[in-house]
Image: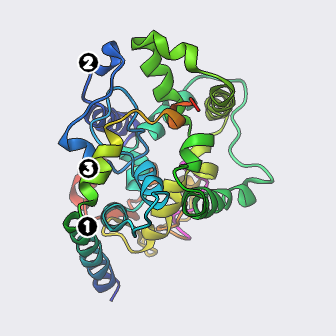
Amino acid sequence: MDNRKRTIIQSVAALIQNADFKGFFTGEIHTGATKGICVPGLNCYSCPGAVGACPLGSLQNSLSAYKFKFPYYVVGMLLFFGTLFGRLICGFFCPFGLLQDLLHKIPFPFKLKKFKADRYLRKLKYVILIVLVIILPICVKLTPFFCKYLCPSGTLSGILLSLGNTGLFKLFGSLFAWKACILGIVVLSAVIIARPFCKYICPLGAIYAPLNKVSLFKLSCDRSKCISCGRCAEVCDMCVDPTEDPNSPECIRCLSCVHECPVKALKAEGIKKKVEKAG
Amino acid sequence: MKRTGTILLLILAVVLMGIGLCSSQFQVVMAKASKVCLECIGIG
């Protein structure tokens, strides 16, 4: 699948997840039964258009509740999405992923693909998942640590909300300044590095990453067809070599490699026919 | 073999969601997500 088609799918997915357009003008968020359904990607439920709940926010709220109960519903939904799609969600259904992809299209004198600390920084998202999303919310009640101190999607939601509700501007203080800095860093680095938030920070990606190996949606490489031209590894923004590990936890299933493979050795299983047609 | 594992995980996911729904966790998620999370947007 080429990038243009993927951008269209990503945009449609982002619009569906933020379909309450009037919220952007009134500065109020959507309320209703759909807010009980977790969306697959990172989309803050405080975003004025959001019609669903952010799975990370919901997970932290459940874990940090006064009376601890195992969050069966949220964990079940995450496992369900992950087992069906793996990180295809990151590549196609995540609104924050779309934002980073669009930012990376902005022309810049140099684009960074790989650097020394990259390998180690990739582990950071697992640390953030364990510490900020699971352990700290369990220990300190009523505090969704990741959402409060790190999540740039929430900051973006705050900015969008305040456009429709100017009264919020007066309430922004040091916490907002800190979060705005993080959002700024993510935005600037996304221009230079492809998907920096997904690579290094996103705990949702860390949840879906190991499920790439077992998900229904999979990539496969036909070794008898592969001519080892290296084109697939060259086009991969996540710096994965699909011929070595087609189901790498780092692969966000953008399918650029499938599209670029000159001998069609790489195949997406599950949507095999559709991919071949698009290619 | 891997497919069996995937199907078992899917069944587990559906069971977990079912338990969550039976214990009103859907309503809890809905109630929380229907209010602006001030901390998430940077107020607090």
Which residue reaches farthest bottom? B1
Which of pointers 2 and 3 lies earlier in the amino acid sequence?
2
The image quarter containing residue A250 is bottom right
Magenta stretch prevailing secondary structure: loop
Residue A254 shown left or right of residue A26 in the figure:
right
Residue A253 shown left or right of residue A201 in the figure:
left
What residue is drawn where x is 37% and y is 33%? A4
Q: Which residues are magenta?
A: A235-244
Distance, label 2 to label 3, CA atoms, is: 20 Å
Q: Which residue is mark 2?
A: A22
Q: Which residue is mark 1?
A: B17
Q: Which residue is mark 3?
A: A37
What residue is drawn where x is 25% and y is 35%? A16
**Along the line of sight, which residue is nearer the eye, A15 or A56?**
A56
Distance, label 2 to label 1, CA atoms, is: 31 Å
The location of residue A20, given as percent across then percent down, is: 25, 26
Distance, label 3 to label 1, CA atoms, is: 11 Å
The location of residue A128, given as percent across then percent down, is: 63, 57
- Mark 2–mark 1 CB contact (< 8 Å): no
The numbered disc on residue A148 is: none
Q: Count residues near mark 3 (Cα–Cα under 10 Å), then give few for <14, some for 14-19, many for 20+.
A: many
What residue is drawn where x is 24% and y is 77%? B11
The location of residue A224, given as percent across then percent down, is: 43, 75
Residue A213 shown left or right of residue A15 in the figure:
right
Check the image and report above or below for A278 versus A225: above
